[in-house]
Image: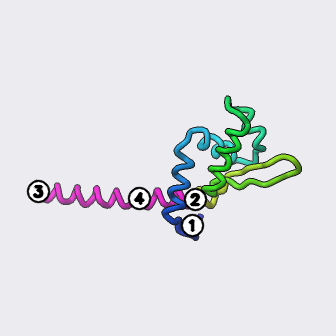
Amino acid sequence: MVVEHELSDADVDRIFRALADATRRDILRRTIDGEQSVSALAADYEMSFAAVQKHVAVLEAAHLIVKRAEGRERLVRADPDTIARARSLLAEYERLWRSRIDRLDSLLAEED
């Protein structure tokens, strides 16, 4: 998958702030395979429906999920494009740190 748009610092902050919460990570995991109604999501948590709605709103603001109305229900699904962008960012950080470690290993080998 090709990542077309680079994430702004604000986007990165929203994404990782959203992913910092275990309930939101679970909601995202549950919506990757397909749409779930907010009601069905809420039924599996020991918190109020309103609290689950707030978690969904944080994920939606981070563009990690997409919400749509179908009659009286609100259906949510994970947004694979944003997940791919976040994965690409983490891969970039990994490459950066690996290259730094490789340079450090080279410097240490030269001293021996």
Calculate the distance from the C-alpha at mark 3 to the C-alpha at mark 1. 41 Å
| Disc 3 secondary structure class | helix
Label 1: state its secondary structure.
loop
Disc 2 marks which amino acid? Ala
* Of the image marks 2 and 3, the number of the one nearer the N terminus: 2
**Circle 2 SS class:** helix
Q: Earlier in the sequence, mark 1 or mark 4?
A: 1
Of the residues shown, which amino acid type is indicated by label 1?
A: Val
Q: Which of marks 4 and 3 is in front?
A: 4
Given residues 96 and 45, the one toward you in this image is: 45
Label 3, on which residue? 111
Q: Would you identify the image quadrant in which residue 24 lies? A: top right
Q: Residue at the spot x=53%, y=57% of the render?
A: 86
Q: Do the residues labelled 2 and 1 touch (CB within 8 Å)?
A: yes
Gap between marks 1 and 4 measured at Cα:
15 Å
Mark 4 crowd level (few <14, some 14–19, many ≥20, 10 Å Cα): few
Q: Which region shows up in magenta?
A: 85-112
Specify the amino acid type for callout 4: Tyr
* Residue 41 placement (x, y as % from top left): 73, 39
Q: How far, Cα to Cα, is label 4 from label 2?
A: 14 Å
Element under label 4?
helix
From the top left corner, tell me how far across and down residue 20 is, in percent.
52, 44
**Mark drawn on residue 3:** 1
Say which quarter of the image contains residue 1.
bottom right
The residue beneath circle 2 is 84
- Given residues 111 and 15, the one toward you in this image is 15
Q: Name the residue under label 4.
A: 93
Identity of the residue drawn at 67% across and 44% down: 54
Q: Does the magenta stretch include residue 102?
A: yes
